[in-house]
Image (cartoon, helix red, strand yellow):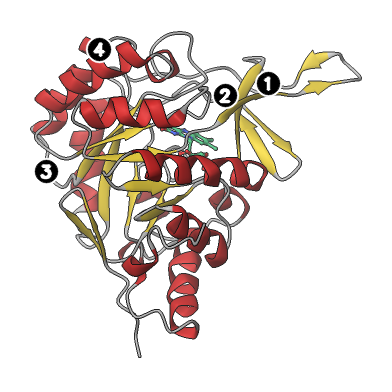
Amino acid sequence: MKPDMKVALAGIEFSNPVIAASGTFGYGIEFEEIVSLERLGGFVTKGISLEPMAGHPAPRIVQTAAGMLNAIGLQNIGVKELLEKKLPALRRYPGCKVIVNVFGYTVDEYIGVIEQLNQGEGIAAYELNVSCPNVHCGGMTFGADADSLADLVERAKKAARRPLIVKLSPNVTSIALMAQVSAEAGADALSVVNTFRGMSIDPETRRPRLSHVTGGLSGPAIKPIALRMVYETAKSVSIPILGMGGIVTAEDAVEFLLAGAAAVQVGTASYADPRATERLAKELENWCRSHQVERVASLTGGVMA
Ligand SMILES: Cc1cc2nc3c(=O)[nH]c(=O)nc-3n(C[C@H](O)[C@H](O)[C@H](O)COP(=O)(O)O)c2cc1C
C-alpha cells in the first residue's frame, strides 16, 4: 500500500508535508541540481525585503553542540529580483509549492513587499517573518510584542492576495498568546518556530564568535523546546501549524506532526546534508508504510498526552 502523503493547509495542497525552511534553501532554484524539487512539498525562500540587503559581516555562522548559531542579518536579493529572476525559473517545478518569507523594518515595508509579491505568479503563500533575532528593529520586535504583532498581521492580511502564514518567535514567554493574537488578527496558518537567541565566545581571544555578537540557535539542540511550543500552539489555536526545529529524521518529523503540526519544515539539516529535505520526504513515506499509516494527515495532533 502506498500511503497518501498529501496534506492541505490554508487552502494549499502539498504533495507531501516536507518543506524546506527559510534561509536554508536559498531561493529554491539553486538546489535544482542537488534535490529533485518536485519531491518536496515545497520550500520557503530566504526572508525578502523591499530593497536588497547585504547582511552582517562574517563570521555569520558558528557550529555548536547539536546545532548552529547564525547571524546572517537577512542578506537577500530584494523583492524585485525575486520576481524577475528567481520565480520565473521555478515554474519548471509546479509540484513544489513556493512560499515567500517576507521581512520589513516597519509595517509599511512589510506591506510594500506583499503588494509587490501580489503582482507575481507562482507563489503559494506568504510567510511573515516576525521572528528574526538578528536585526535591531523589525523582525522579532514585532513578534515579541502582542500589540505590534496584532497590528502587523491585521494589515498584512488585508494587503495579501494569498494565504498568510505567520512565523512565530520562540523568544517569548507565552507562544500560545502570540499564536492567539496572530489567529485573531487573520493569520491563515502559523510557522513554529524561528531560531532561539544564543551566543558563543572564543575563550582564547575572549571575543564573541559571531560578528553580530548574538545569533539564532537552530538544529537538533532546539528540537525538544520547539516541539513543546508546537504542542502548546496547537492547543491554543485552530489554524494549521507548520512545525520545525531540529528535524533530521523521519521520526523527528512524525513527532512534530503528532504534536499538532500539519506540515514540517527542515532547515539546519540541509547544511549537514544538502539532500536532507528530499531524503526526509522519502523516509517519511517509508515510515508511514511500515507503520500502516494510510494518510500522513491522520498523524496531525495524534499525541496521546
Ligand atoms: C542560516 C539560517 C538562516 C535563516 N534565515 C531565515 C530567514 O530569512 N527567515 C526566517 O523566517 N527564518 C530563517 N531561519 C530560521 C529557519 O527557517 C528555521 O525556523 C530554524 O532554523 C529552525 O529550524 P531548523 O532547526 O530545522 O533549522 C534561518 C535559519 C538558518 C540556520
Image disc number at residue 107? 4
The percent coordinates of residue 137 (x first, y second) are 42, 8
**Mark closer to the chain start, 3 or 1:** 3
CA–CA distance in space, label 2 to label 1? 7 Å
**237 left or right, relative to 65:** left
CA–CA distance in space, label 3 to label 1? 37 Å
Give the residue pinned by disc 3: 121
State the residue at coordinates (50%, 68%). 279
The percent coordinates of residue 181 (x first, y second) are 30, 24
CA–CA distance in space, label 3 to label 2? 31 Å
**Mark closer to the chain start, 3 or 4:** 4
Residue, far bottom: 1
Q: Tell me the SS state at disc 2.
A: loop
**Mark closer to the chain start, 3 or 2:** 2
Residues at badges 4 and 2 in contact (C-beta under 8 Å)? no
Viewer-side residue, 250 vs 297: 297
**162 left or right, relative to 214:** left
Image disc number at residue 210? 1
Image disc number at residue 71? 2
**255 left or right, relative to 295:** right
At label 2, the amino acid type is Ala
At label 3, the amino acid type is Glu
At label 1, the amino acid type is Leu
